[in-house]
Amino acid sequence: MQFMLIFSCQGKLRLQKWHVPLSEKEKKKITGGLVKPILAQKSKMCSFLEWRDMKIIYKRYTRLYFCCVIEDQDHELITLEIIHCYVELLDKYFGSVCELDIIFNFEKSYFIFDEFLLGGEVQEIPKKNVLKAIEQVNLMQEEAGTTCSVLEEID
């Protein structure tokens, strides 16, 4: 996977994860050019597009589009499954994920993505393993927060 974009029905970028080295100017140009043809697609149309020299796989979930750009040798249906697994992980963590969850908890969304995919390749297949890693990080953050608040009270 070269990169993944999550954007709203209005074309507002909510999350982006790049696995190819590009300048910010190039990323903005690609993002702007990529969002328009996807939003123009009718809901009954295929979720695969060829745009420029890129293979685009996307899926709409409620008010968000999850879009992946893959290499020629990568399989489209596997990429759709990866998108679906990522959305399921977000759903399990946030409890029916919505656009606001991603906006206000983008660091958790990135963390879940990084636990699931590393460098554009699937890292962990069992969702239970990914969720367990997320729970462990949450516990460590809570313990660190408790320690900080105890230290603040001592001062």
Image (spheres, rainbow, N blue to C red):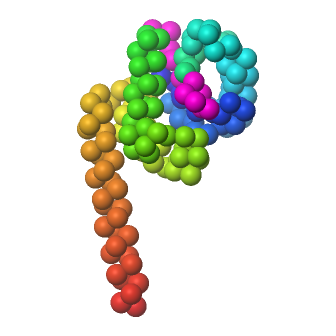
Where are the magenta residues, as a range?
A: 60-73
| Relative vertical location of residue 46 with respect to residue 136 in this rendering, above or below | above
Report x, y in % for residue 123: 32, 31
Q: Residue 21, can we see it?
A: no
Classify residue 50 by image quadrant: top right
Compared across the picture, whether 25 is left or right of 146 comes to: right
Of all residues, the one furthest to the bottom in this rendering is: 155
Q: Position of residue 137 (x, y in %)?
A: 33, 54
Q: Quadrant of residue 53?
A: top right
Please give the name of the residue rendered at 58% of the width and 8% of the height, measured from the top-left corner: 46
Q: Is residue 75 left or right of 33 when viewed as pictured? A: left
Between 53 and 51, the residue placed more toward the observer is: 51
Count of marks, rendered view: 0
Q: Position of residue 63 (x, y in %)?
A: 62, 32
The residue lying toward the viewer, choosing from 27 and 97, is 97
27 is higher (above) or lower (below) than 78:
below
> What residue lies at 39% left-to-right and 27% top-to-bottom?
85
Q: Residue at x 36, y 62 (%)?
A: 141
Residue 9 sits in which quadrant?
top right
Q: Residue 46: within the magenta?
A: no
Q: Main secondary structure of the magenta part?
A: strand
Residue at image location 58% in from the left, 30% down from the top: 62
Whether residue 63 is visible: yes
Q: Quadrant of the C terminus?
A: bottom left
Looking at the picture, tell me which residue is in the foreground, 91 or 85: 91
Q: Which of the two residues, 74 or 5, is positioned nearer the viewer here?
A: 5
- Image location of residue 83, percent across then percent down: 46, 25
